[in-house]
């Protein structure tokens, strides 16, 4: 559905993105993660042909997003990071305008989406709060039921209830076989809805992985409660054990890799309780990429 081939965008001498290569398949919910200024918006805008690539190619639906921009844009829904339109227009007027542009006879599922996101379609956009404008932004991106939704920071400005409604909407779109590409700072939200994520840092793609894989391959938090006091070094010296803390009978640590040695060491004692907890995507991100999101 989306193919980026060494996509590079420089702003004069300034870095935008460098050599971003990526494939996103139909039906995927894909997340772009990265700190402020990493290049998420630049990737999205260059991918959609809204910015001219310095080098490299972007294909969407198998079409060149620059030379076939009209055909590409007719088939997708886009919520830009800086969603802003003529402030005197109401949401409904904006939707009519976009429907004309997209060659649609009616406003499709605009009413249904407006109800779902509690979007106010009859007030001028300039009078709406940022969050309420964002809701209209979501409706305009999706009302024509596109195969592909590209959403740059879709939940920014939304309150927790609306964030929840949005995540449910994305889950429903996935069920319907739609493809969704979104960027976010909120790892919790990405963990909940995305199949795969790309991590962008300083304009480069540093990892592309499936969410379950990242979390599954990372460490587990292990808590062992034993019947008697043990020497914590018995566990501390095992391969893959890090950050161990012990108060004698209770030993907690992170275990990377397989748990065989941990289980065998524990089995030499009477085990009262054993707890294994997978980290959140946020924890993994902070541990492996040591940075802010
Ligand atoms: N119009 C522009 N002119 C010059 N530099 C720009 C321009 N737009 C973006 N940049 C630079 O490109 C880099 C990537 O910015 P971009 O907006 O793509 O990051 P982002 O990951 O979307 O950040 P955020 O999370 O803050 O929205 C930054 O270093 C930024 O300063």
Image: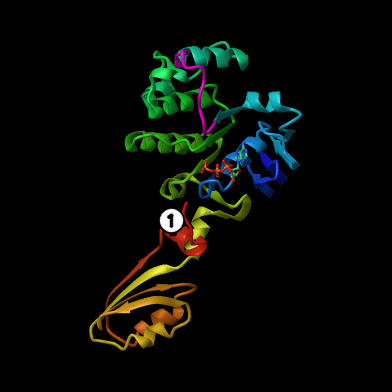
Q: Residue at x 49, y 73 (%)?
A: 257
Quarter of the view holding residue 150: top right
Give the side of residue 164 with respect to residue 96, left or right: left
Circle 1 residue = 282
Closer to the camera, 257 or 290? 290
Residue drawn 33% across the image and 38% down it? 160
Quick check: 43 above or below 109? below
Q: Position of residue 89 (x, y in %)?
A: 47, 13
Q: Name the quadrant containing residue 69.
A: top right
Crowding at dot 1, Cα within 10 Å, few <14 / some 14-19 / many 20+, comes out as some
- Residue farthest along the front direction in this orientation: 13
Q: Relative to 185, say whether 130 is above or below.
A: above
107 falls in the magenta region: no
Question: How far across and down, in percent of the image, does residue 54 sit?
Answer: 74, 41
Residue at 43% x, 25% y is 133
Q: Can the viewer see residue 21?
A: no
Give the overall secondary structure of the magenta segment: loop
Q: Secondary structure at mark 1?
A: helix
Which quadrant is the N terminus positioned in?
top right
Query: Bounds of the magenta span?
Result: 80-91
196 with respect to 66 (left or right): left
Q: Position of residue 177 (x, y in %)?
A: 55, 36
């Amino acid at each position: 559905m989306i193919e980026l081939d060494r996509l590079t965008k420089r702003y004069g001498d300034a870095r935008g993105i460098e050599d971003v290569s990526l494939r996103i398949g139909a039906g995927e919910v894909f997340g772009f993660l990265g700190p402020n200024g990493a290049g998420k918006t630049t990737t999205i805008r260059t991918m959609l042909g809204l910015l001219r690539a310095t080098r490299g190619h972007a294909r969407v639906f198998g079409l060149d997003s620059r030379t076939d921009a009209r055909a590409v844009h007719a088939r997708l829904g886009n919520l830009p990071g800086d969603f802003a339109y003529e402030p005197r227009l109401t949401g409904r007027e904006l939707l009519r305008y976009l429907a004309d542009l997209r060659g649609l006879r009616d406003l499709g599922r605009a009413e249904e989406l407006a109800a779902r996101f509690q979007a106010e379609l009859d007030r001028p956009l300039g009078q709406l709060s940022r969050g309420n404008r964002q809701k209209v932004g979501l409706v305009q991106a999706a009302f024509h039921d596109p195969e592909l939704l590209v959403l740059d920071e879709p939940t920014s400005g939304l309150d927790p209830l609306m964030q929840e409604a949005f995540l449910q909407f994305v889950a429903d779109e996935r069920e319907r076989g739609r493809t969704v590409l979104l960027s976010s700072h909120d790892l919790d939200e990405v963990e909940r809805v995305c199949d795969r994520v790309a991590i962008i840092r300083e304009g480069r793609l540093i990892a592309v992985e499936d969410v379950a894989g990242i979390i599954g391959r990372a460490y587990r938090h292990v808590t062992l409660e034993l019947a008697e006091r043990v020497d914590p070094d018995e566990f501390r010296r095992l391969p893959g054990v890090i950050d161990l803390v012990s108060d004698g009978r209770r030993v907690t640590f992170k275990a990377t890799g397989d748990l065989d040695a941990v289980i065998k060491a524990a089995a030499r004692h009477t085990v009262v309780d054993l707890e294994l907890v997978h980290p959140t995507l946020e924890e993994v991100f902070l541990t492996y990429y040591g940075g802010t999101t």
